[in-house]
Image (tube, rainbow, N blue to C red):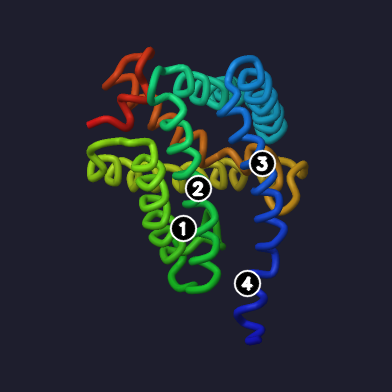
């Protein structure tokens, strides 16, 4: 095997294994809802807050913003999941956007290479990864919507693409914050990913987008429908 191909993907295995366990857990919480959903996502929000405070120690305004940043982790899945008939599909759609854009941006970026997306902030990210992750995520998320019986898929596809770009923007935002404070990883609790915040940065950004869009179009009680039904 060409070593130039093998090396860039050398750590993909551990990332996929860790990601698979986390994805399975997220899917279980989404399916069960209720107390399980609250408990798991509350714990994740607490991890994110602790990691954010560790990174921004001694900076009161940054630490205050961390409360909002961590709250998104809890508010988004609860609001989408409890928003009626399309609540569960909307949350699964969001998972598809975030997970696919993350994995495929990594794969496309490592295999294709090319110009860097924002080398001063995240030297490993490329335009090939950004475009590949966005397109694959658009397809995957639209497929989830189709499986849920959403009637108009073209608008959902466009929203999925936008959400995928925002998800990757969330990754860059966290990278910029870590670089500004001289930190490489938010933590080390997840093999291949770093901290919980390192794993949820894209979810926080895309989730906030979905929450705002869903509430604007469907209200708090029908946010899932606001995201998927056009």
Residue 139 picture location, percent across and down: 37, 53
Q: CA distance from mark 2 to mark 1?
A: 8 Å
Q: Which residue is mark 3?
A: 22
Res 27 → quadrant: top right
Mark 1 = which residue?
118
Query: Which residue is pictured at 43% across the width and 58% down the height?
Result: 130
* Alpha-carbon span between mark 4 and mark 2: 20 Å
Q: Is residue 66 visible?
A: no
Q: Secondary structure at mark 4?
A: helix
Residue that carries the numbered disc 4 in the rendered image = 8
* First of labels 4, 2 by sequence position: 4
Closer to the N terminus: mark 3 or mark 4? 4
Question: Are there few (<14), some (14-19), or many (20+) residues within 10 Å of tag 1?
Answer: some
Residue at 50% of width from left, 66% of height from top? Answer: 109
Please give the residue where the numbered disc 2 appears in the rendered image. 172
Circles 4 and 1: CB distance less than 8 Å?
no
Neighbours of disc 2 within 10 Å: few (<14), some (14-19), many (20+): some
Position of 115 with respect to 226 (left or right) is right
Quick check: marks 4 and 2 in contact, CB under 8 Å?
Answer: no
Residue 59 vs residue 134, the one in the foreground: 134
Which residue is painted at 70% across and 41% down in the image? Answer: 195
Q: Residues within 10 Å of mark 3 (few under 14, many from 20)?
A: some
User: Which quarter of the figure has residue 181?
Assistant: top right
Identify which residue, 180 or 53, lies in the foreground: 53
Q: Are marks 2 and 1 in contact (CB under 8 Å)?
A: yes
Of callouts 2 and 1, the N-terminal one: 1
Q: Position of residue 18 (x, y in %)?
A: 70, 49
Name the residue located 41 percent from the left edge and 62 percent from the top edge.
132
Residue 9, horizontal then vertical, whole percent: 63, 69
Image position of 25 with respect to 50: above or below:
below
């Amino acid at each position: 095997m060409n070593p130039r191909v093998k090396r860039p993907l050398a750590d993909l295995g551990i990332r996929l294994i860790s990601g698979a366990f986390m994805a399975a857990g997220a899917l279980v919480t989404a399916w069960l809802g209720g107390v399980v959903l609250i408990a798991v996502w509350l714990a994740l929000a607490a991890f994110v807050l602790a990691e954010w405070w560790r990174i921004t120690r001694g900076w009161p305004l940054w630490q205050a913003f961390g409360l909002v940043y961590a709250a998104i982790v809890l508010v988004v899945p609860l609001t989408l999941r409890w928003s009626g008939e399309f609540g569960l599909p909307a949350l699964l759609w969001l998972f598809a956007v975030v997970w696919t854009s993350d994995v495929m941006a990594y794969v496309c970026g490592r295999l294709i290479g090319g110009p860097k997306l924002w080398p001063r902030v995240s030297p490993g990210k490329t335009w090939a990864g950004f475009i590949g992750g966005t397109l694959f995520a658009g397809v995957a998320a639209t497929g989830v919507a189709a499986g849920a019986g959403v009637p108009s898929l073209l608008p959902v596809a466009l929203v999925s693409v936008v959400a995928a770009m925002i998800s990757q923007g969330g990754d860059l935002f966290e990278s910029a914050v870590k670089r500004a404070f001289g930190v490489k990883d938010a933590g080390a609790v997840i093999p291949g990913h770093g901290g919980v915040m390192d794993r949820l940065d894209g979810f926080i950004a895309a989730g906030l987008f979905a929450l705002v869009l869903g509430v604007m179009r469907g209200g708090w009680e029908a946010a899932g429908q606001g995201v998927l039904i056009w």
